[in-house]
Amino acid sequence: MWTSLHASVHHTIRSRHLLKRNQRLLIAVSGGQDSLCLTQLMLDLQPKWGWYLGIVHCDHKWRDDSQANAKYVEQLAEKWGIPFYLETASQPLKSEAAARNWRYQVFSAIAFTNNYQCIITGHTATDRAETLLYNLIRGSGADGLQALTWQRPLLNQIMLVRPLLEVTRSQTGKFCQDFQLQIWLDSTNLDLKYARNRIRQELLPYLQEKFNPKVESNLAQTAELLQAEVEYLEQAADELRQKAEVQTDEPENSFTLLRLNRQVLQKAPLALQRRAIRQILQQIMSNAPNFEHIEKLVALIAAPNRSQTDPFPGGVIAVVEDEWICLIC
Ligand SMILES: Nc1ncnc2c1ncn2[C@@H]1O[C@H](COP(=O)(O)OP(=O)(O)OP(=O)(O)O)[C@@H](O)[C@H]1O
């Protein structure tokens, strides 16, 4: 059966150039409604595109039923007649972030070993809206609000692709019902101690009911707009940084890591100054620079001669020397 969802995902993949014909694609399947919907769609689109499909599942060993969950996905892969790859965590992972990192490493490694070019995940417009809200509440800038890109490179030149970013969770739920795809219910998704679950189960329904029934799609669209703007700004900031930055490798300057030309930076708008400075701090700090770190260094662009910062994490300090900001270790 060919539905309007098949047509719209087919159109998205084609118009956004997400995937090519005859590629080897590894679908990440948790067993939940989004990834089951995704798999059925990919199987149905496969004859048109000539893809070679496989399924990967990660058992985080978090839940008592995780092994049964993995078995269930394996049976589905068998029923669908496509290769199945399973990786089980050797020890329970400490946090959701640790689990995600491990998962993406597994995806890239399995894809690389078995010659798949892309990993496909079932992230939806709802995930995008949830991530945007989550990051907004935490005080993120536009980068965090662009929330989930259509594609990004993983390790080993494998691409991560998310073809369902314009499809909502209620659409994937209905699709699973229509196609009688039995969903594996993840009990941790119900636990309201996680902020993410409260956003999904309490905040978004509240916004839908009291403010705008289309809030999910609208927030996803905001993320989409921000994505293009962030890409543009990052590129412009990169050019500004390259113009302003002088690497110093002369022996007499061996403690000066690099110098930044203040005149070049002064001419740029604040948004680009902040981004260029962030890129520089990313080079010298082990952790991601926060808002205060960036503002401290931006302040030196117009500060009097000899002004300086206190040390950044990692020990580097910045000092104004005439037209230069010198980063000294
Ligand atoms: N354990 C897993 N094994 C393989 N892929 C996974 C796993 N967990 C998540 N994914 C992939 O990442 C996507 C998003 O993950 P998230 O945790 O938001 O999904 P979920 O709530 O489990 O969603 P879904 O309804 O697809 O199962 C999933 O759609 C799936 O493609």
Image (cartoon, rainbow, N blue to C red):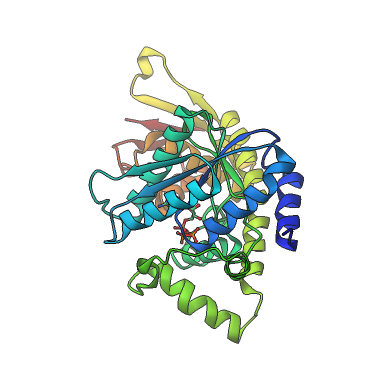
* Front residue of this view, candidates 267 and 19: 19
Residue 143 appears in the picture as rendered: yes
x, y percent for residue 119: 53, 41
Residue shown at 65% from the left, 67% from the top:
217
* Front residue of this view, candidates 53 and 28: 53
Q: Quadrant of residue 276?
A: top right
* Front residue of this view, candidates 93 and 67: 67
Residue 288 appears in the picture as rendered: no
Q: Where 222 sits versus 259, above or below?
A: below
Residue shown at 51% from the left, 24% from the top:
246
Q: Is residue 233 left or right of residue 329?
A: right
x, y percent for residue 328: 35, 30
Q: Where 119 sits versus 210, above or below?
A: above
x, y percent for residue 124: 58, 60
Q: Is residue 139 left or right of residue 125?
A: left
Residue shown at 48% from the left, 46% from the top:
78
* Front residue of this view, candidates 253 and 64: 64
Residue furthest left in the image: 91
Q: Quadrant of the C terminus?
A: top left
Q: Quadrant of the N terminus?
A: bottom right
Q: Is residue 290 left or right of residue 77?
A: left
